[in-house]
Image: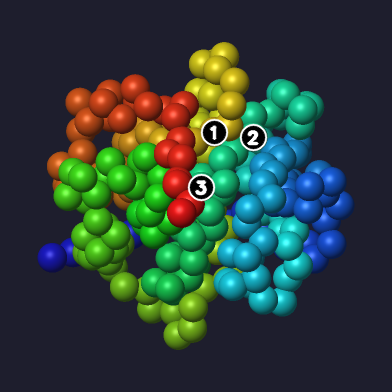
Amino acid sequence: MATQRLSFFPIAISTSQSLPSKRHGYCLSLPSSSLYGNKLLLETSNLSRFVAKYHPSTTATVSFSLPAKPERTSSEKSPKWSARSIKSFAMGEVEARKLKYPNTGTESLLMGILVEGTSQAAKFLRANGITHFKVREETVDLLGKSDMLYPGPVRPPLTIQAQRVLDWVVDEKLKSGESGEITTTYLLLGIWSEKQSAGHKILAKLGFNDEKAKEIAKYINEEIVLNHK
């Protein structure tokens, strides 16, 4: 069976070892000379251990390049992302690199949600039989195996479709008028909204549909609280 491959559009991604942050958390931003121009700040104080595990050469602050539309001129007005959604994004990059893909696509973002595993979105997917193993299998079946000799960049840049997903997420949160952080459910629904993307096709093949999207959308602003005993 012929495999279908996505066309990849490289976007510069930068890593900083000493980004200023009052909370010493994650700061996700675009360089000022990039296509989108403005900064989208995503901060959390709970991810330093994760960074140290997967990127031991960096300190607790890491700069991700994420899309922010030109009209977003104030980082204070940009909604913040939850720790789970940031970790899901980061794990998506890790999954893309494991598959030796040169870019992080919607399929990798979907795998990232499932690898993080503790969010409302991840639990909903697993309850509907959509697991990381199945998504990974469908990804290789759809996109094929990479012919790269070595894994891709440490931070595989986003595909154009993955960029649109993140833009959709921010737009939807702003339109909702709801306070609070952007949950991982927004990320899942963003993937579903990108109908020509690999992530959407894989979800559809595994039984996700508009009815399930409406069901999980009811909890879009809710995050699961983990009980620590």
The kind of residue tagged 2 is Lys
Q: Residue 107: where, in percent of width, then height?
A: 36, 53
Judge the density around disc 3: few (<14), some (14-19), many (≥20) Cα neighbours within 10 Å: many
As drawn, is 136 to the left or to the right of 69? left
Which type of secondary structure does the marked residue at label 1 adopt?
Answer: loop
Vertical side of 192 occupied by 64: above or below? below
Please tell me how crowded label 1 is: few (under 14), some (14-19), or many (20+) other residues with Cα within 10 Å: many
The reply to whether residue 228 is in sight is yes
> For mark 3, what is the residue?
84
Q: Which residue is mark 1?
A: 182
Answer with the quarter of the image where residue 127 lies. Answer: top left
Amino acid type, mark 3: Arg
Based on the displayed image, in which of its 4 quarters is residue 140 positioned? bottom left
Residue at 20 percent of width and 26 percent of height: 211
Q: Who is closer to the viewer here, 73 or 36?
A: 73
Q: Position of residue 35 (x, y in %)?
A: 70, 42
The residue under label 2 is 80
| Residue placed most toward the observer, 147 or 182 | 182
Q: Residue at x 43, y 39 (%)?
A: 224
Q: Which mark is residue 73?
A: none
Q: Which badge, 2 or 1, comes first in the chain's sequence?
A: 2
